[in-house]
Image (tube, rainbow, N blue to C red):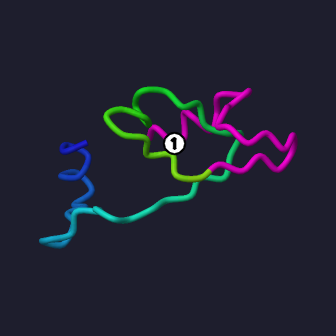
Amino acid sequence: MDRVREIIRAYPPAGITGRGIGIAVLDTGICPMADFTFPENRITAFKDFINGIDTPYDDNGHGTHVACF
């Protein structure tokens, strides 16, 4: 990603880290894999508008893929 930043000249302003910022991803779901749950769970909310399931899951895989990147 550093090379891409150089090519498109996308440099964040000094002192901006993204800490404390929450992001919502509206997609097919999210699988609670280690990338999101270790060393601490970063999935702070989950809402299934179709099946009403309360625990995070992704029966399609697209939402998990999008959330990783």
19 is within the stretch colored magenta: no
- Which quadrant would the C terminus be assigned to in this image? top left
The 10 Å Cα crowd at callout 1, few under 14, some 14 to 19, many 20 or more, is: some
Judge whether 13 appears above or below 36 on screen.
below
Query: Which residue is more in the foreground, 55 or 50?
Result: 55
Instruction: Using the image as rendered, state which of residue 63 and residue 55 is in the foreground.
Output: 55
**Mark 1 is on which residue type?**
Ala
Q: For the magenta stretch, what is the residue range? A: 46-69
- The percent coordinates of residue 14 (x first, y second) are 12, 71
Question: Within the image, what quadrant is residue 2 found in?
Answer: top left
Q: Considering only vertical position in the picture, is 14 above or below 49?
A: below
Label 1: state its secondary structure. helix
Is residue 67 on the magenta stretch?
Answer: yes
In the rendered view, does 25 fall on the left or right side of 43?
Answer: right
Task: Give me the residue at 51% from left, 42% from top.
Answer: 67
Q: Position of residue 23 (x, y in %)?
A: 49, 59
Asked whether 2 or 49 is in front, the reply is 49
Q: Which residue is mark 1?
A: 67
Q: Quadrant of the N terminus?
A: top left
Q: Is residue 62 left or right of residue 15?
A: right
Residue 50 at x, y percent in the picture: 87, 44
Residue at 54% from the left image edge and 40% from the top image edge: 66
Taking depth in this image into account, of 9 and 55 the one nearest to the observer is 55
Q: Residue at x 46, y 37 (%)?
A: 68
Residue 52, horizontal then vertical, whole percent? 84, 44
